[in-house]
Amino acid sequence: MYLPMCCRVFEKLLVWIFVFALAIGGVNAQNKDSIRNVYIERFPDYFFIWPLIKQRTNQFEIQQESNASNRLTYKPNNSVGLGFGLYVFEVGAEITFSVPIGAERESLLGKTTATDLQLNLLGKNWGLDLFYQNYRGFYVTDPNQNILKGMPFPQRPDARTNNFGINGLYAFNKKFSLRSAYNFSERQRKSAGSFLLTGTINFFDVALDSAVYGSKYYATLGANTAFEQLQMNTASVSPGYSYTFVYKAFFLNTSLSIGPAVHWVDYAVDLRARSAIVVNSFLDLRIGIGYNGKRFFSGVNFVGQARSAKFDGIQFINSSNTFKIVVGYRFNEVGFLKRKAYDLLPIIGIHK
């Protein structure tokens, strides 16, 4: 029941957020800011095309609260995606196709099947990430266990996770562009930074056919947290800061938000239900580096979020990461390509 419900909610949110983005785009396009134009260059008369390499992952860790070296990390063996992106009508979209994983790698790390849907929106001073991830099949790493070269890692093909949520951030400085380092629809002309306010609402659950770890780990991780099912719902509002250093057309951006988060944790051990409400942390990290010229642009960026909750002597961490490489070019708009997204609002029954 959980998967279909999440998909329906995801579809409805996609529609409403897309409409919201079109409306905001119309307002932004009509509001000129002379100060902002000194620091930031827009490209309203171009459309962009870029090939890309992208990898998205979702993993979880269980570690001893008193000793972080005693930990187990459950990682998916998912492939890299190849595809392309297009920015037209002042709306960006990307599509990727998975590269097949070799038989040798699959024998060492197991097989992962994944559904990974994401919508990333960046406005003048705001960003929004909506995501749904469903993974099945993980391999396990233990820093205290040596795996000989060519030998397979411990595998949990029965482990399955669902991760659904929304992240948002707001930058307070009008001289600073979030878009310049991550979707290239703008260019930061001068170095600038901004304080951020980041928020998240997240629903994560993991289920296994048997205990997440065996009795050999009871001494370090405890028997009370050898769960077969766990659900962690998180809400957080966190402060942060982002800065883009610019040298000619080259740039380096780093954004970090970290703050308190409330986690509602429900889990089952030997089919016995347990629960906890804990206040721990949420982290949002973004790094972008590249070249952003008048026509040509390229970059590498990393976006990661991590949610951490401590209960019953362990620390449970769920992290979602996206790594992307893009190379693109801006072309002059001609004909119908000169239209903007907000021009379509009357067509779909929405008026500016």
Image (tube, rainbow, N blue to C red):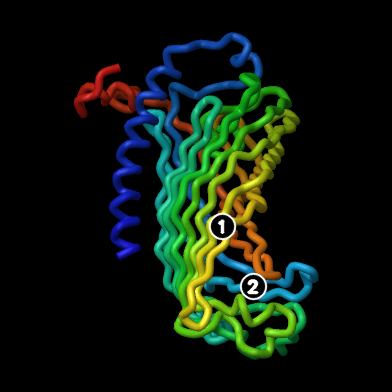
Residue 293 sits above or below residue 275 on the image: above
Residue 221: mark in rendering: none
Counting residues from the N terminus, which is met first, the one under dot 2 or under dot 1?
Answer: 2
Q: Quadrant of residue 104 in the image?
A: bottom right
Kind of residue sitting beneath label 1: Ser
Q: Which type of secondary structure does the marked residue at label 1 adopt?
A: strand
Q: Which type of secondary structure does the marked residue at label 2 adopt?
A: strand
Residue 73: mark in rendering: 2
Q: In the depicted view, which residue is nearer to us: 336 or 191? A: 191
Residue 338 sits above or below residue 159 on the image: above
Q: Where is residue 335 in the image (x, y as percent from the top left)?
A: 30, 24
Q: Mark 1 points at which residue?
A: 320
Q: Where is residue 227 in the image (x, y as percent from the top left)?
A: 54, 77
Kind of residue sitting beneath label 2: Thr
How far is disc 2 from disc 1 in space, using C-alphas?
Answer: 13 Å
Residue 197 sits above or below residue 226 on the image: above
